[in-house]
Image (cartoon, coloured by chain):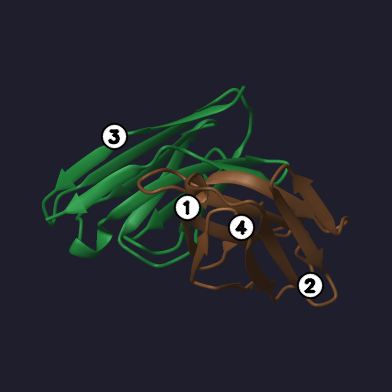
Amino acid sequence: SQTIHQWPATLVQPVGSPLSLECTVEGTSNPNLYWYRQAAGRGLQLLFYSVGIGQISSEVPQNLSASRPQDRQFILSSKKLLLSDSGFYLCAWSSQGEQFFGPGTRLTVL
Amino acid sequence: GENVEQHPSTLSVQEGDSAVIKCTYSDSASNYFPWYKQELGKRPQLIIDIRSNVGEKKDQRIAVTLNKTAKHFSLHITETQPEDSAVYFCAASFGGTSYGKLTFGQGTILTVHP
């Protein structure tokens, strides 16, 4: 069966520091992959999606970037974090339409 | 692009009552409509979905209905229990060239009182 992993689970970072969040999927090939951010008490904002290695589409302009170096690996990065980057970051994969979320990374920027 | 409106934003019911959450979508080409349940601090979990070739789908105490003409779909939970308390999100997507991207509603906070 398919599983999706994210790490770290929680992260506290100072403003201006870099960021790297990782997501890996097991048990499926060539999935569509997504990064979402959820602010406290808010809905799901799609940040990036990828349909294949090296193929990244950005949904909103921001100081974040994404990369897909391998078929089942998706990375979210930032060179300099802002206070507004705090939130719950969720990776998701889909195949045949159904979309499944990873456990998430809770990021606090101080 | 697609736009999904979800109502109500909060819903409070007594245990055993029914709960209904409604969503409307704008893109008539959308053909896949999932519902997610998110408990506090957890990831959203897919609980039921419906595709545009059917009008209703049931799974035990939950059901989803779809009205393609009116472009709205609803989640129905019967015999609610305290463990149904969570945030529920509807979503819509078109499985053609949008690469499975989901457009989510704003969420409904459901509280079931014992």
Chain under callout 4: B
Q: Residues within 10 Å of mark 2 (few under 14, many from 20)?
A: few
* Label 4 sits on residue: B102
Q: What residue lies at 18% left-to-right and 62% top-to-bottom?
A: A83
Q: Amino acid at mark 1?
A: Ser
Question: Which hue belongs to chain B?
Answer: brown
* Label 1 sits on residue: B85
Q: CA distance from mark 1 to mark 4?
A: 23 Å
Q: What residue lies at 54% left-to-right and 38% top-to-bottom?
A: A53
Q: What residue lies at 77% left-to-right and 48% top-to-bottom?
A: B58
Q: CA distance from mark 3 to mark 2?
A: 39 Å
Label 1 and label 4 in one chain? yes
* Label 2 sits on residue: B28
- Labels 2 and 4: the sequence-earlier one: 2
Chain under callout 3: A
Check disc 2 and report its element: helix, strand or loop: loop
Q: CA distance from mark 4 to mark 3?
A: 25 Å
